[in-house]
Image (tube, rainbow, N blue to C red):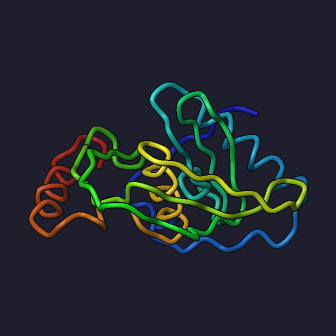
Amino acid sequence: MPERPIRLFGDPVLKTVSAPVEQIDDGVRALVADLIDSVRLPGRAGVAASQIGVNLRAFSYNVDGEVGYVINPEIVEVSGEVEKIDEGCLSVPGLWHKTPRYAYARVRGIDLDGNEIEVAGTGLMAQALQHETDHLDGLLYLDRLEPAERRVAMRQVRESDWF
């Protein structure tokens, strides 16, 4: 399967809460394959289904050489100090802002066989798990910014050549 085009800020699918996957079928298998292909491109730590225009709860990740996916992910644990970390997003290209994120995150979901899986980590993995789960809840990292930082970011979005 080829990588899929990324939806950009302003596309309504990015602000829509994604529906749970009710049944693993050929469509869901194809979606996961597309998510994996899409996240393997250089510079990508994660891709949520909503970013490729599919309103289902699934995302892929590619962190420190570990590539995988989670269907119906839910954050079950966050811990550590909330840190402001430089964060960007494929759906908001070219912009990076200090985003508050927990130092550790653990996500639970299922795989293509319906088995429960968990993915957890610190650093970039914790950031990716929180970021991608936010996408599935209809949130962009811009929504997490402090008010002054968000004003700057929204001005940059409006002035960008892709918006």
Asked if 159 appears above or below 154 in the picture, the reply is above
**Horizontal and vertical percent for residue 12?**
46, 67
**Horizontal and vertical percent for residue 49?**
62, 55
Asked if 35 appears above or below 54 in the picture, the reply is above
Asked if 54 appears above or below 44 in the picture, the reply is below
Give whichever of 61, 8 is nearer the camera: 61
**Horizontal and vertical percent for residue 109?**
71, 63
Asked if 44 appears above or below 81 in the picture, the reply is above
Q: In the rendered view, does 9 fall on the left or right side of 78?
A: left
**Horizontal and vertical percent for residue 89?**
38, 46
Give whichever of 122, 39 is nearer the camera: 122
Q: In the rendered view, does 89 fall on the left or right side of 7?
A: left
Q: How many marks?
A: 0
Q: Quadrant of residue 123?
A: top left
Q: Residue at x 57, y 53 (%)?
A: 48
Give whichever of 11, 97 is nearer the camera: 97
Q: In which quarter of the image is residue 43?
A: top left
Q: Which residue is drawn at 61% across and 36% down?
A: 38
The N terminus - image quarter: top right
Q: In the rendered view, does 25 fall on the left or right side of 21?
A: right
Q: In the rendered view, does 102 fall on the left or right side of 78?
A: left
